[in-house]
Amino acid sequence: MIDTIVLMIDDKNFSILDHNRFNPSTEFLYQPVKFNSHGEQKFICNPTKKEKEKYYFPRLSIHKRFYGVGFGVTMKIEFSAPKLLFQNNFQELDDADFDSVIQILSSRMQELKIFIHPDVLKKAYVQKIDYSKNIFLDNYTTCSMVISEYYTG
């Protein structure tokens, strides 16, 4: 089952509707600024406490990187697909859930004042996927017992 997904979107494919949602503000994102020692500037968007009580939200960051003659801007969207869809990570997703995940992700992005068309999310570059599988353990078996049996067996 897919759990955590990291998508990368370039700046031509999203619109920031409220620059002050980011820390630091992205208001001057395209102005010349000092970059850190890695040639990068990072902007973080976190949901408010009130928003987190209502829904699960993706973690967002915008990365501005210096490339010698110019710079590039990308948005990193990191989220747990089951938490986004089911509000938990115990229920497993299948292929039929893809469109629902995209629609909810697009909606949550709009709540964070960022517009990304669902078609862009469908075709986004996937930087990382973490897989998981929920299994039922009975007879008081623990995860560590299963792992040690696997490595010693």
Image (cartoon, helix red, strand yellow):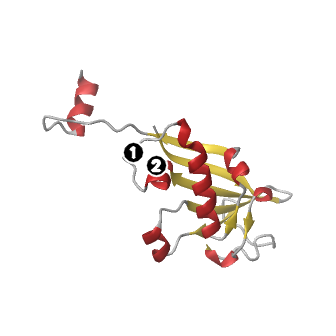
Label 1 amino acid?
Answer: Gln
Circle 2 residue: 82
Circle 1/circle 2 CB separation < 8 Å: yes
Q: Earlier in the sequence, mark 1 or mark 2?
A: 2
Q: Residues within 10 Å of mark 1 (few under 14, many from 20)?
A: few
Q: Quadrant of residue 126?
A: top right
Does residue 141 appear left or right of residue 50 in this picture? left
Q: Quadrant of residue 44?
A: bottom right
User: In the visual, does 36 lie left or right of 85?
Assistant: right
Q: Residue at x 77, y 56 (%)?
A: 13
Provide the residue designation for mark 1: 91
Instruction: Tell me which corner region of the image, top left, top right, bottom left or bottom right, holds residue 37.
Output: bottom right
Find residue 125 and report its horizontal and vertical position in percent: 68, 44
Residue occupying image coordinates x 44% and y 53%: 86
Q: Is residue 25 visible?
A: yes
Give the percent coordinates (x, y) of residue 1. Answer: 45, 37
46 to the left or right of 64? left
Residue type at mark 2 is: Pro
Q: Position of residue 149 (x, y in %)?
A: 22, 27
> Neighbour class for label 2 at 10 Å: few (<14), some, many (≥20)?
many
Name the residue: 62% across, 75% down.
21
